[in-house]
Image (spheres, helix red, strand yellow):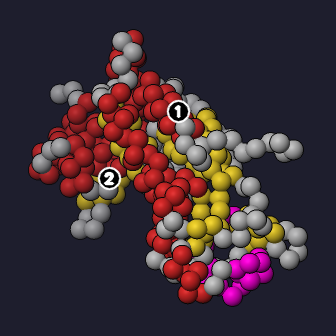
Amino acid sequence: MKITLDELQAFATVVDSGSITAAAQQLDLTVSATSRTLARLEEKLKTTLLRRTTRRLELTEEGKAFLHNARAIIEQVEGAEEQMLARREMPAGRLRVDAASPFMLHVIVPLVQGYRERYPQVELELNSNEGIIDLLERRTDVAIRIGRLKDSTLHSRLVGNSRIRVLASPQYLAAHGRPARVEELSKHTLLGFTQPEALNVWPLTGADGEPLRIEPDVWSSSGETLRQLALAGVGIVCLSDFMTAQDRANGSLVQVLARQTQDVRQPIHAVYYRNTAISARIVSFVDYLVEAVRATEFGGAAPRRGA
């Protein structure tokens, strides 16, 4: 009996999701059907691909070797389908997008409806990770990265630039006073990031003449969590314009130390692997994102020096 593409996809999905139950949900199958498909594949191969324990599934050595080939076959089939669809200029298929939760919630989510109306055959899978992920390991087609890029193995396209500002809620300032000088921040509750440390460098000049590196009183790995803390009046925060534009417009957050704040902007890139052919669906999504972001207040480039 020959191995089918459905069996390969079921095996890869079980590995990626970590369980047969989760894989069944992704494949829109019952758990029993997914389990039978996996068992049928192992029977055809005359080997065990996955060890099943009460807590998790673990790849055997044979499973690891076969997974590599299975992924290659799936990608080749998807690529062939994509090429045929591209001939008709109809981007289609699943597009896996990863972005930190603030960018996902404040930028990508509001664009999904318009993108889907323009490209109805593209199936979007949206995932949020606060840190840098391995695109191949997470089977991600395109990721949004904010800040300076370090990975030279990736293709990238600049989506836009977003200014960072020091902000607080009117309620916090009414209760604790509004700092008039940078050194007065030491008397306030400061909200900052657990990682990366670079996000705790604020666009202000410290007593040593260098950019101010704060020591947070309240920490979080998520910018969205810090935004919510600031909105709740917990303290002063430094966040990017892409996630606070509406808050500043409606007065929920106001800028602090505006005159002392330097014009510092974070570059926002869409990235994908160099050895991955640029599919029609990746191009369609990135083009749509760039067009939408650059039409916003925060999406423009930083002013040139001397301008």
- Compared with 277, 242 (above or below) is below
Tell me if 248 is positioned left or right of 259 in this view: left
Q: Which range of residues does the magenta coloring cover?
A: 179-199
Query: Given the image, on which type of amino acid does mark 1 rest?
Result: Glu
259, 70: nearer the viewer: 259
Q: Earlier in the sequence, mark 1 or mark 2?
A: 2
* Residue placed under numbered mark 1 in the picture: 291
Query: Measuring 12% from the left and 48% from the top, which residue is drawn there?
Result: 30
Decide: marks 1, 2 in contact (CB < 8 A)? no
293, 170: nearer the viewer: 170
Is residue 60 visible in the rendered image? The answer is no
Residue 24 is a magenta residue? no
Residue 185 is a magenta residue? yes
* Residue placed under numbered mark 2 in the picture: 17
The answer to which image quadrant residue 22 occupies is bottom left
Helix, strand or loop at label 2? It is helix
Q: In x, y percent, where is residue 6?
A: 22, 34
Helix, strand or loop at label 1? It is helix
Disc number placed over residue 20 in the picture, else none: none
